[in-house]
Amino acid sequence: MTFGIEFVPSDPVLKVSHYAKLAEQQGFDNVWITDHYNNRDVYTTMAVLALNTNSIKLGTGVTNPYTRNAAIAASSIGAINEISGGRAILGIGPGDKATFDAMGISWDKPLTMTKETIAAIRAYFTGKTVNQTGEMVNISGAKMAFNTGNVPIYMGAQGPKMLELAGEVADGVLINASHPKDFEVAVKQIAAGAKTAGRDPKDVDVAAYACFSIDKDAKKAASAAQIVVAFIVAGSPDMVLERHGIDVAAKADIGGAIAKGDFGALMGGMITDGMMDAFSICGTPDDCKARINDLLDIGVTQIVAGSPIGPNKEKAIKLIGKEIIGGN
Ligand code: F42
């Protein structure tokens, strides 16, 4: 098992860098930086992290093929790979429609766009001239002018077809989920894709990109994760809620409370224990370890501690290092 951590550059870059250095010291293997247009730029953040860390792998977690053309993504991650001495990973997923609508970018064929962009980026990594004719990505004679290295590519995916595609073409897959039931399904879909492509499913790193909250006090851990779980419930497909026995009608109520900014209602009982169990790895170190072991048994190979990580980020990183990573 490897252990990763997610940071969102809604925090200043130097603060993220401080946390990343601490995570490295605590034995984490990977740091993943999210990419949203309205936060600090992912590659700028990773460049600073590259200079301030020595061994932790640095991944976009995840960038998208709509705001960043394949050539730009290859050049950006290639530069990070160079600065970091070969520690870069490109995490890529299609992003979500609402974000691109707001930016005036049409979000067509997310799966096809992701697939063709990954093919293009892999071609750029060879350093050869790229010619590609596709439905979404067309390239006529572009090439990288420096050695990017062959950076591993991970996909952000949840849907059945995206997970199959990850099994076919990706080195790893970052799955926004926390519960064994979701991974039972996902691991099968990834394996099916790998089989189609004649690959060994074991060659795909399966990462649980989880809402994670750890504290010695289980109640404090839970209250730090409640808002994140509220957003996950509001954005989950009905099929996923049903899989966890969650009332689908609650999704609209929670979405409404989020839209109104009614955090009092959200924190005051709308988020049930069942929702917390389905959509987070949360509690004391022993609680978190039990869930992690269940995930590993099902075929998860990387645990990524995503937001909020804990009520106190620094304490949480140290607690994971001491009680979970060090304890393995
Ligand atoms: N998104 C961000 O914008 N920034 C982030 O930092 C970020 C981090 C992140 C981390 C982990 C993770 O798992 C996801 C993350 N995401 C982030 C979201 C990510 O970018 C993707 O939006 C998300 O993972 C994709 O969700 P999904 O797997 O459910 O895929 C969607 C697109 C979907 O509908 N998939 C369907 C499926 O079954 O898998 C397939 C849809 C399909 O086949 N579409 C056809 C096509 O060609 O695209 C078109 C069909 C038609 O009718 O035209």
Image: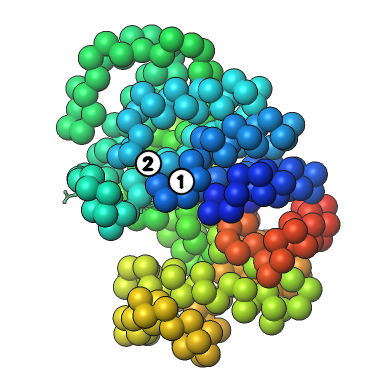
Cβ–Cβ below 8 Å for labels 2 and 1?
yes
Q: Amino acid at mark 1?
A: Asp
Percent x, y for residue 286?
76, 70
Q: Is residue 291 left or right of residue 241?
A: right
For label 2, the crowd category at 10 Å Cα-Cα, with few meaning under 14, some 14 to 19 and many 20 or more, is many
Q: Position of residue 71 (x, y in %)?
A: 36, 23
Q: Ligand 1 closer than 8 Å to the CB at disc 1?
A: yes
Of 141 and 304, nearer the camera is 141
Q: Nearer the viewer, residue 17 or 60?
A: 17
| Residue 61 visible, this orientation | no
Whether residue 174 sits left or right of residue 319 in the image: it is left
Alpha-carbon span between mark 2 and mark 1: 8 Å
Q: Read off the residue under disc 2.
A: 64
Q: Residue at x 65, y 32 (%)?
A: 50
Q: Position of residue 208 (x, y in %)?
A: 55, 55
Q: Secondary structure at mark 1?
A: loop
**Does label 2 or label 1 sit earlier along the sequence?**
1
Per the image, the residue denoted by label 1 is 35
Dividing the picture into quadrants, the one containing residue 218 is: bottom right
- Which residue is drawn at the image coordinates 34% and 46% (left, top)? 94
Q: Amino acid at mark 2?
A: Asn
**Colour treatment of the image:** rainbow
Whether 99 is drawn above or below 148: the answer is: below
Front label number (2 vs 1): 1
Label 2 near ligand 1 (CB < 8 Å): yes
